[in-house]
Image: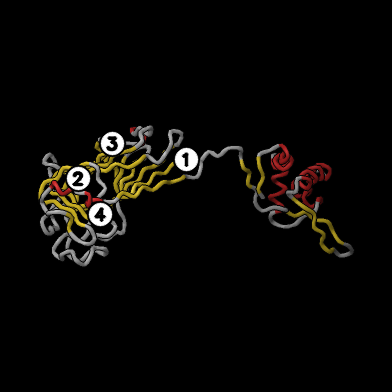
């Protein structure tokens, strides 16, 4: 039974706001009883019990049931509802809404790349390998794979919420690996993640991999080259920033200016990092995961 918290439902609320009537319901949950039996079990006078039964019956919490006796039908009481839900005028915890921003690997807005470096679509290489200037050709938007041995790659994405929204979580997922000519299973790389130019944490990629072909890696791509990476998930929460559930920094949602029209996301690995092993980013048509860089914002209006 569902009711709203309004004056018209006051009888049922009042009917339940009494210890004796709660005790009556506790007895009736076991079996049907008549007034005399309830009076005896609760050690209260029949007149008092009848008054409580009347209030419960008028509120439609209990009802009468007539059962055949030895000489005539006898009147018993049974519980009439098995559940009561009260809806308050406001919701304290609103259902989250979410917006997903899909960022293609080739749609970067800024970069710094040192060889080895390059871009590839699902059909072939884009430009000339190990020539950073080809990161600026218009065809870069078609890139499904990019790699650089040192530098950074940066993306802009629009702010999907309004100033009146309350953001509860930002989730960023991507497939990533280190960069080494061909592949190298043990080639650690300390990759920094920057949100709006603030370093929100670092993760060390173990290497890049070519032991088997990536599930979505196109057939033209050489077997000896990096085939897949690891799917990593960054979560910016009200308390901290995590990667795959492990805390990587104290950066939190309150550090973000949600009045901005767009945000920036940077992947960086430079000479300042202890493990300068480069970056490889996989799009939806390369590697083991059919997705681009994906940003999900959970919020309420």
Residue 93 visible to an observer of this rendering: yes
Q: What residue is pinned by disc 3?
A: 196
Q: Secondary structure at mark 1?
A: strand
Foreground tag (1 vs 4): 4
Q: Position of residue 255 (x, y in %)?
A: 33, 32
Q: What residue is pinned by disc 2?
A: 191
Q: Work out how far the residue at label 3 is from the one at label 1, CA to CA, in angstroms.
A: 22 Å
Question: Badges 2 and 1: C-beta atoms under 8 Å apart?
Answer: no
The residue shown at (69%, 52%) is 81
Q: Is residue 150 shown left or right of residue 203?
A: left
User: Within 10 Å of the Cα at label 2, are there few (<14), some (14-19), or many (20+) other Cα atoms?
Assistant: many
Q: What residue is pinned by disc 1?
A: 300
Q: What residue is pinned by disc 4?
A: 142
The residue shown at (24%, 37%) is 199
Question: Badges 1 and 4: C-beta atoms under 8 Å apart?
Answer: no
Question: Badges 3 and 1: C-beta atoms under 8 Å apart?
Answer: no
Q: Work out how far the residue at label 2 is from the one at label 1, CA to CA, in angstroms.
A: 32 Å
Q: Earlier in the sequence, mark 3 or mark 1?
A: 3
Question: Badges 3 and 4: C-beta atoms under 8 Å apart?
Answer: no
Q: What is the basis of the colouring in this image?
A: secondary structure
Q: Position of residue 66 (x, y in %)?
A: 82, 59
The residue shown at (43%, 46%) is 98
């Amino acid at each position: 039974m569902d009711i709203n918290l309004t004056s018209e439902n006051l009888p049922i609320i009042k009917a339940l706001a009494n210890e004796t009537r709660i005790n009556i319901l506790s007895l009736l949950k076991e079996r049907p009883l008549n007034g005399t039996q309830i009076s005896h079990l609760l050690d209260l006078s029949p007149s008092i019990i009848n008054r409580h039964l009347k209030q419960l019956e008028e509120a439609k919490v209990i009802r009468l049931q007539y059962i055949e006796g030895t000489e005539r039908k006898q009147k018993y009481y049974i519980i009439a509802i098995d559940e009561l839900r009260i809806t308050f005028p406001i919701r304290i915890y609103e259902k989250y809404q979410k917006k997903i921003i899909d960022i293609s690997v080739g749609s970067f807005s800024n970069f710094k790349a040192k060889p080895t470096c390059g871009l590839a679509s699902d059909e072939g290489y884009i430009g000339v390998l190990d020539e950073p200037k080809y990161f600026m050709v218009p065809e870069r938007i078609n890139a499904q794979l990019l790699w650089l041995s040192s530098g950074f790659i940066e993306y802009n994405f629009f702010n999907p919420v309004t100033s009146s929204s309350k953001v509860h979580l930002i989730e960023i997922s991507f497939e990533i690996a280190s960069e080494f000519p061909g592949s190298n299973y043990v080639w650690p790389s300390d990759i920094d993640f920057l949100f709006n130019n603030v370093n929100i944490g670092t993760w060390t990629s173990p290497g890049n991999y070519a032991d088997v072909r990536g599930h979505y890696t196109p057939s033209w791509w050489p077997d000896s080259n990096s085939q897949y990476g690891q799917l990593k998930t960054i979560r910016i929460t009200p308390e901290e920033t995590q990667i795959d559930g492990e805390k990587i920094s104290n950066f939190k949602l309150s550090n973000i200016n949600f009045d901005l029209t767009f945000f920036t996301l940077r992947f960086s690995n430079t000479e300042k990092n202890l493990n300068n092993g480069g970056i490889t980013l996989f799009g939806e048509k390369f590697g083991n995961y059919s997705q681009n860089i994906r940003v999900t914002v959970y919020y309420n209006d």
